[in-house]
Amino acid sequence: MSEQCSALIDRIIVLRKAKGLSQKELSARCGMTQSVIARIERKKSTPTISTFVKIADALGACLLYTSDAADDRISVD
């Protein structure tokens, strides 16, 4: 797994927790199983771009927010 992919997953975890969502709640919003989200978060599975987009959409975030190009001061409200 690339360093960029790993960093993107780390930001997704932070955002999910900041929104108060469990993996199960996020998976329901994404139309995925909880085990898929868990494997992604444990970095046992490398998601496709379309999976990253689905997760970002489910979190109400722009995919850029989760990338290194994002400004870390963006609110998660």
Image (cartoon, rainbow, N blue to C red):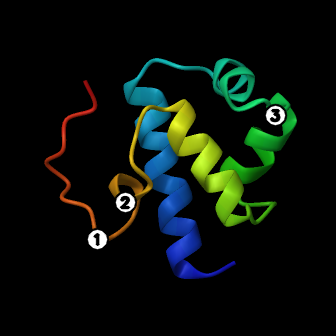
Task: Give the amino acid type for the residue marked by disc 2 in the picture.
Answer: Leu
Between the residue at mark 1 and the residue at mark 2, the CA separation in whole angstroms equals 6 Å
Name the quadrant containing residue 75. top left
Q: Tell me whether the residue at label 1 lies in contact with that at label 2, contact meaning CB atoms closer than 8 angstroms.
A: yes
Q: Residue 10: where, in percent of width, then height?
A: 49, 54
Q: Residue furthest left?
A: 73
Task: Give the amino acid type for the residue marked by disc 3 in the picture.
Answer: Met
Residue 75 position (above or below residue 44): above
Q: Sort mark 2 into few (<14), some (14-19) or many (20+) by Cα contacts within 10 Å.
A: few
Q: Which residue: 62% across, 54% down?
A: 52
Q: Residue 18: where, in percent of width, then height?
A: 37, 28
Q: Which residue: 53% across, 38% down?
A: 57
Element under disc 3 = loop
Q: Which residue: 28% across, 32% down?
A: 76
Q: Mark number for residue 69?
A: 1
Q: Which residue is mark 2?
A: 64
Compare marks 3 and 2 and give the one earlier in the sequence: 3
Position of residue 43 in the picture relative to residue 44 (left or right): left
Residue 15 position (above or below residue 24): below
Name the quadrant containing residue 77. top left
Q: Tell me whether the residue at label 3 lies in contact with that at label 2, contact meaning CB atoms closer than 8 angstroms.
A: no
Q: Nearer the viewer, residue 26 or 6?
A: 26
Element under disc 1 = loop
Q: Which residue: 26% across, 62% down?
A: 70
Name the quadrant containing residue 49. bottom right
Between the residue at mark 3 and the residue at mark 1, the CA separation in whole angstroms equals 27 Å
Q: Mark number for residue 32?
A: 3
